[in-house]
Amino acid sequence: MKEYQRCTRCIMDNKSDLTIIFDENGVCNYCKDALNSGAKIYFPNKEGEIKVNELVVRLKKENSKRKYDCIMGLSGGLDSSYLAYLGSCWGLRILGIHIDDGFDTKISRNNIMKLCDKANIELITINPDRKQYNDLTRAFIMAEVPNIAIPQDNILFANLYKYARKTGVKHFLSGGNYALECILQKGNTHNAYDKVNIKNIHSKFGRYPIDNLELISDQQRFIDKYILKIESLRPLNYVNYNRERALKELSDFCDFEYYGNKHHENYLTKFIQIYWFFNKFGVDKRKSHLSSMIISNQMTREEAIQELEKPLYDEEEMNKLVNYILKKLDLDQNIFYRIMDRPGKQHNEYKISKFSKFLHTIKR
Ligand SMILES: [Zn+2]
């Protein structure tokens, strides 16, 4: 076992990530790469303002004959909510897609309603077949793979592309951003478009059919993206995206209420982010989130370490959350805790799509 080492600039360490590399000064590859790419993708300045203006003019022009200028997934989380708010300030006509998978928190549901109402965003809420969705998510837990949010993500992507085909709109606005996500942990994840992996895991652990769920494969996305020329844009990289300020602006604009922490807008996501990853894979997601904020100058390393020293969750509250999730997924407690006692598996221990693998290889 290697000796514990934490980066001297950010707070990534070799406990949460075995692939991390440190240089002679103890600086890790994550923050080094993030700082190098920052200059190329993040423009929290005058140049960003120009880029936003150009983008808005282009979206309006290219979609002038359509009902919307762009399509966005709205999770109720900060990134997509703030972008939707900015988009509406920029005068964009947005079609919002929200997946209500039955695990939304009340705060988040209200936030989405208040935001869309105030920003005049047309919202389509998709309700995936509960029984089938829960069965698929349950199968992912039974498969003991890290990214059990894949069913949730895939259904959102499937619907984004579906509405792009339906409306003819060729632009997605994505809340993905440098400021809060410039450090994303590698390892313990998998491509959410790998339908082969989804189907294989379900064939092994599912109990019901999943024929009512709208899923998208990498091939389909490839066709949509390159043949229909669909573009995914990240305008949060063109503004000085500061978490505290974004929350304040949203709260002033539509009474947006904060729901706790990154990704805690949905009970299932919260369970995955702070319980599943940590207890099954030893990954504390706060390390990459806080490290991103150090790199985008929203926090000092000392503040991040202080934050990290706080317990990840309150035991009693987490017990309630776990019980709630297990009940909804119809997963027996004894089976679940036996799963939690075993080391995790990886997605490639199940069938994976050769096409996804190929795309992934050429992207590198
Ligand atoms: Zn680092």
Image (cartoon, rainbow, N blue to C red):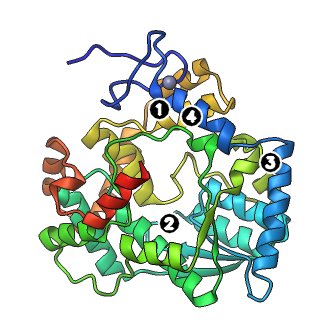
Question: Which residue was labeled with disc 3?
Answer: 48
Name the front one of labels 2 and 1. Answer: 1
Q: Assess whether mark 4 and mark 3 are in contact (beta carbons under 8 angstroms).
A: no
Circle nearer the N terminus (1, 4): 4
In this rendering, is residue 65 above or below 35?
below
Quarter of the picture containing the N terminus is top left
Q: Is residue 10 left or right of residue 221?
A: right
In this rendering, is residue 344 above or below 221?
above
Give the CA distance from mark 2 to mark 1: 25 Å
- Where residue 179 appears, as percent x and y from the top left, is 65, 41
Question: Which residue was labeled with disc 2?
Answer: 104
| Residue at mark 4: C-beta within 8 A of ligand 1 | no
Name the front one of labels 2 and 4. Answer: 4
- Where residue 288 appears, as percent x and y from the top left, is 49, 35
Question: Which residue was labeled with disc 1?
Answer: 287
Circle nearer the N terminus (2, 1): 2
Q: Which mark is residue 162?
A: none
Disc 3 residue type (three-letter): Gly
The crowding category of the residue bearing disc 4, from other C-alpha atoms within 10 Å (few below 14, some 14 to 19, many at least 20), is: some
Describe the element under mark 1 as helix, strand or loop. Answer: helix
Residue 256 sits in quarter: bottom right
Q: Assess whether mark 4 and mark 1 are in contact (beta carbons under 8 angstroms).
A: no
